[in-house]
Image: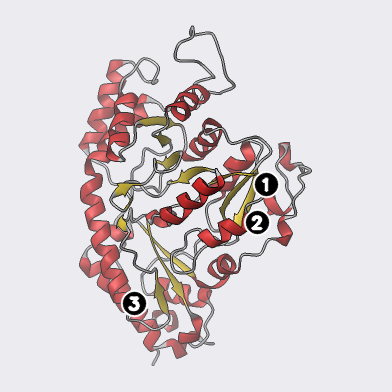
């Protein structure tokens, strides 16, 4: 008789994991106050500016500028950091497309480098190899909420005089050597999109300790206005990328409960790392004492099929889901293999742009292995479950490991 649920056996779990977003009366009360107050846009309200200060203080940053999305925040941060149009910006091949599209948006060329298999984060050795005379900046990603190697990246940037814009879209409160990420480089960008650990549906924020970066970020996100000019004087190129007071009202409430939810996520992430490390074929991310806070946006690990009767990852994922454990393979393609980059269709309606670069020649073996064979993600709402929920995740993977012979047809 079959043991695995995918073969007709009894599943480990039948109940759903906690839903996201988590919300309560505080979000409703905050929204009600803004609606009744009549100042729904940030230009005359104070809710957004108050949140900017709170979030910046939490991350030991001098400035915070709220933006209408995390993607737009990356774009504006690059402009504000004075990254030259037409130059090359290095970023990881294993990340969400917004990292690279922000680079294209400002007229620069993304140069993709590989990630480390034991961290899923950018490999500093690959950064060095990718630097050319056209390189002006690095945009590394704190993937899944785990800080990248800031010691190595900042050393390279300082030595080669490169700008660093941290893509911290998944890394609220994450810390490296007890210093919160986001304002260690020239600027850092966070996202408040629906799936994120702090959310208002959409939105983002730029953090920086550089007065000039802050000055231009504020101008570019507010129609190019200057803080000293007349209202209808526009000194710089810009657009309307402002956050609304309604979004900021929700974010205040979300930030108030963040520490408690983060404590739960972190406890569960540590527990899963401890227990899943004991299962052959499950490779967790390497510990690093320099990481003094993990934002826990995703729990990620590598699936090594040779320990599971050589069953492809898709087969393992199907078996895991049938056991009641939702899991994702993550990014399906390295960024340089995405159609938009392969065809360089960056113009209106997908028209090809004639850039002197051939993305078909890029090859990042670790990224390709993660995309096609190994990476598995658990989303952050799963990390809000109980210890019993985590035990069921562990039990499901142990069950599949024990009965791996049932994975083959």
Tell me if label 3 and label 2 are in contact, CB under 8 Å. no
The residue pinned by badge 3 equals 277
The residue pinned by badge 1 equals 133
C-alpha span from label 3 to label 2:
31 Å
Q: Residue 63's x, y, as percent?
A: 37, 30
Q: Nearer the viewer, residue 120 or 307?
A: 120
Q: Outermost residue toward the front? A: 159
Which residue is rendered at x = 49% and y = 65% of the image? 116
Q: Quadrant of residue 67?
A: top left
In the picture shown, does residue 330 fall above or below 173? below
The residue pinned by badge 2 equals 336
Q: Residue 332's x, y, as percent?
A: 57, 62
Disc with the residue nearer the chain's start (3 vs 2): 3
Q: For residue 62, say whether it is visible.
A: yes
**Mark 1: which secondary structure?**
loop
Q: Residue 317's x, y, as percent?
A: 46, 72
C-alpha span from label 2 to label 1:
21 Å
């Amino acid at each position: 008789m079959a043991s695995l649920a995918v073969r007709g056996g009894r599943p480990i779990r039948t109940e759903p994991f906690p839903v996201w977003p988590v919300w309560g009366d505080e979000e409703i009360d905050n929204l009600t106050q803004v609606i009744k107050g009549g100042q729904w846009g940030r230009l005359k309200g104070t809710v957004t500016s108050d949140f900017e200060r709170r979030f910046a203080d939490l991350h030991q940053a001098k400035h915070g500028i709220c933006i209408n999305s995390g993607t737009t925040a990356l774009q504006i941060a690059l402009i504000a950091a004075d990254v030259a149009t037409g130059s090359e910006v290095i970023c990881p091949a294993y990340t969400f497309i917004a990292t690279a599209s922000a680079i294209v948006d400002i007229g620069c060329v993304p140069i993709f480098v590989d990630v480390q298999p034991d961290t899923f984060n950018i490999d500093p050795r690959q950064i060095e190899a990718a630097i050319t005379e056209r390189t002006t900046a690095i945009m590394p990603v704190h993937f899944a909420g785990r800080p990248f190697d800031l010691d190595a990246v900042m050393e390279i940037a300082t030595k080669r005089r490169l700008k660093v814009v941290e893509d911290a879209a998944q890394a609220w409160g994450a810390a490296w050597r007890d210093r919160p990420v986001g304002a260690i480089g020239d600027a850092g960008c966070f996202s408040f999109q629906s799936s994120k650990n702090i959310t208002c549906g959409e939105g983002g924020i730029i953090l920086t300790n550089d007065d000039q970066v802050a000055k231009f970020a504020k101008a570019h996100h507010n129609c190019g206005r200057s803080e000293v000019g007349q209202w209808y004087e526009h000194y710089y190129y810009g657009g309307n990328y402002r956050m609304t007071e309604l979004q900021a009202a929700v974010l205040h409430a979300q930030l108030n409960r963040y520490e408690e939810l983060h404590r739960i996520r972190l406890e569960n992430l540590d527990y899963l790392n401890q227990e899943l490390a004991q299962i052959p074929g499950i490779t967790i991310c390497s510990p690093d004492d320099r990481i003094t806070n993990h934002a826990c946006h995703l729990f990620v690990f590598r699936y090594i099929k040779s320990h599971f009767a050589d069953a492809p990852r898709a087969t393992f994922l199907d078996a895991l889901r049938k056991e009641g454990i939702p899991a994702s393979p993550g990014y399906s393609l390295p960024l340089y293999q995405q159609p938009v980059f392969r065809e360089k269709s960056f113009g209106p309606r997908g028209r090809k742009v004639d850039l002197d670069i051939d993305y078909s020649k890029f090859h990042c073996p670790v990224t390709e292995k993660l995309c096609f064979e190994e990476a598995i993600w658990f989303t952050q709402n799963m990390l809000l479950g109980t210890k019993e929920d985590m035990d069921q995740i562990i039990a499901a993977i142990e069950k599949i490991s024990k009965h791996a012979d049932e994975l083959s047809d």
